Image (cartoon, rainbow, N blue to C red):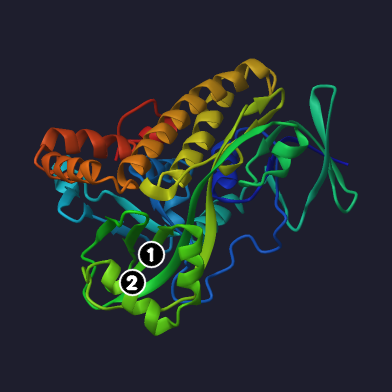
Amino acid sequence: MQIVDLAVIGAGAVGMTFAAAMRDKGFKIAILDDKANLCPPPQTAFDSRVFALTRASERIFESVGAWEFFERNSPFQSMEVWENDGHIQFFCDELGEPNLGYITELWVILRALAQTLQTSSDIKFFTNSKIAALKFQQNQYLITLDNGEELTANLVIGADGANSKVRELAGISLNSKEYHHHALVATVQTELPHQMTARQRFLGSSILAFLPLSESNSCSIVWSVPPTQAEELLNLSIEEFNQLLSTSFAHKLGEVSLISERFSFPLIKRHSMHYVKPHLALMGDAAHTIHPLAGQGMNLGLLDAASLAELLLQNRNRPLGDFQTLRRYERWRKTETSTMMTAMDGFRYLFGNDFLPLKTVRNWGLNLSNQNAFFKRVVMSHAMGLTGNLPILSRLSY
């Protein structure tokens, strides 16, 4: 029988970030994951799984000691959004920042966090470990793995993704709604250099984003399309796909060529009815998933991790897993996440509607907003995690 203070279920970016924030603070921590290899390198030049990291996320990684282990990052200095006659562009210079954020491959994040944690004597990894049961008893949880091994923990953290086993075993209900979109992701090579600019084009029923990678002519694409169109795009020959992709992006970067496999997955809005129970908390995709329209999913999860770590460390006079402390975390993060979800739903409705008068208004609005420097500073400051109700770890001075 293993006895720990904290059991983090899920060795993804959010779970390991939380563990990094809590390490060397006198807690015995177990990290459990059903994968045998936590950070396998990509099979191609770039990992197709990439995330846009905000300044707040950068500061969190820096605060927990992981940023120095990031092997490569792709900073972007501007962002361009357009639809037909409407256009808006953001520049880091307008905020006095060196960049607007980073496009980072998942394996880079996971490897950096694993390196951060590997020297801590407080942390033990249980890989290839699937949870079979959770039983609450005497103010702690008994965790049973599928191989029969057992652990007890004063606080269980469910950071095990959108299909969270912890959420299921804890009996926490979930509100979910299909976006009726699939995300098609791939890595491409472009004829013209991306110039460290993230680009997004609204195409009526679909949204196409080109995210700049560390090589000047390489981008990761995220194409949000209706399910039937996603299937069609997957079945196109490489030549047909390249031609359609180049045309759909108005040849903004010239001719585009696939350099990876194409992957597609459904986009579903999920929000847990509760983030916490006594001695148990959910974070990241286990608590919420949103449309990748603004690239905020990973950043919301990292803020969850930093916020809960802050509250636990501030309330060390209370028992670990104290429900009052966990409820403060739930109120804090559920409010912030709900606000972001509402904003994303509004953007999706606004830009996913082909009603002609609305198209005219939104194109006019984009152009008008592009001329308003104050509006753009406010939008980007919030999107980058420079303003708002932020945890201490994300407010490290740059």
Residue 371 falls in which quadrant of the image? Answer: top left
Q: Would residue 42 appear left or right of 60 to someone viewing this image? A: right
Q: Amino acid at mark 2?
A: Leu
Quarter of the figure that contains the C terminus: top left
> Is residue 78 visible to us here?
no
Judging from the image, what secondary structure is the residue with disc 2 in?
A: helix
Tag shown at residue 135 = none
Tell me what residue is drawn at x 63 percent, y 15 percent: 324
Q: Amino acid at mark 1?
A: Ile
Q: Return the x and y of residue 330 as percentages of the image width and height.
A: 56, 24
Q: Earlier in the sequence, mark 1 or mark 2?
A: 1
Q: Which residue is mark 1?
A: 221
Q: Would residue 236 appear left or right of 362 to someone viewing this image? A: right
Q: Return the x and y of residue 61 as percentages of the image width and height.
A: 44, 45
Judge whether 143 appears above or below 330 on screen. below
Crowding at mark 2 (Cα within 10 Å: few <14, some 14-19, many 20+): many
Q: Whole-Å distance between the Cαs marked 1 and 2?
A: 10 Å
In front of the other: 203 or 213: 203
Tell me what residue is drawn at x 63 percent, y 60 percent: 38
- Residue with the most extreme right position: 148
Judge whether 91 appears above or below 279 on screen. below
Judge whether 49 appears above or below 327 on screen. below
Q: Would residue 309 appear left or right of 98 to someone viewing this image? A: right
Q: Which residue is mark 2?
A: 245
| Residues under numbered marks 1 and 2 in contact, where contact means CB atoms less than 8 Å apart | yes
